[in-house]
Amino acid sequence: MARRLRPLRRRAPLFRQRERLLVVCEGRVSEPEYFEELRNFAKNPLVVLKIVPNAGATKMLVEHAIREMEKAEGEARRCSDPYRRYDQVWCVFDVDNHGGLKQAVRLANTHGLKLAISNPRFELWLLLHFVAHSADRNGHTVQRILTKHLPGYDKHINFSKLVAGYPDAVRRARQLDSMHKTRGTAGGNPSTGVYVLTGVIVRPPRTR
């Protein structure tokens, strides 16, 4: 008797549980170290870090991110592999000592990039892991306050001392956003959008 053939079944499409992220930083030490450690902690290999040291102006950082995004788009087309594209592209930078912020924001919005801006600087996000901070201070003062909680801080990150305070940092950063929204001073000093980016990085994998 001839063997009955099973009907062919269409293979299920590939499913990526997490989004592929490009994170472009201007800092040489603090930002890259923090996001690299967070990526490892979250076991999320789809986070790609690019560092642009001495970017000079925030617009240059955004322009670099756009070039990286377009490069990935080109590779995806050439290889017929949509997973080579970035699902989200983020730029991480400080307000402190940088010009051209408005132009950078407009350019990022035009190209669909997301921004994680800290005012006055990234150290505010680190400080929020330990204590609430709602005073308008310059970057040097914020860094000095941070050293009270991270003795010897010199831009290098000891991630093990930050992990426990991460949920508090997210809550405090949200409270700052809410405070500025009420006052009509969105993005004012102090504030940081880093918590939104970190939330994407640590987000659990999706299920089918």
Image: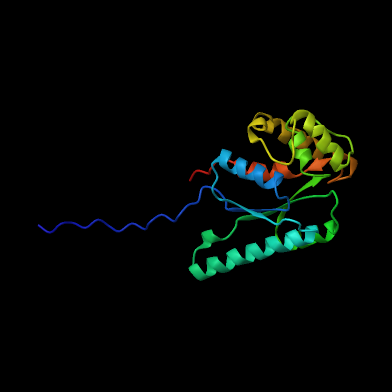
Give x and y (percent) for residue 94. Answer: 79, 49
Give x and y (percent) for residue 182. Answer: 87, 39
In which quarter of the view is residue 134 placed?
A: top right
Instruction: Identify whether 122 is placed above or below 147.
Output: below
The quadrant of the rendering that contains the N terminus is: bottom left
Q: Nearer the viewer, residue 158 or 20?
A: 158
Give x and y (percent) for residue 13. Answer: 44, 56
Q: Nearer the viewer, residue 144 or 9?
A: 144
Tell me if 113 is positioned left or right of 73 in this view. Answer: right
Residue pushed farthest bottom?
78
Tell me if 1 is positioned left or right of 120 in this view. Answer: left
Asked whether residue 88 appears in the rendered view, the answer is yes
Q: Nearer the viewer, residue 19 or 154?
A: 154
Q: Residue at x 53, y 69 (%)?
A: 77
Instruction: Identify whether 131 is placed above or below 53.
Output: above
Instruction: Identify whether 24 is placed above or below 160.
Output: below
Total residue callouts: 0
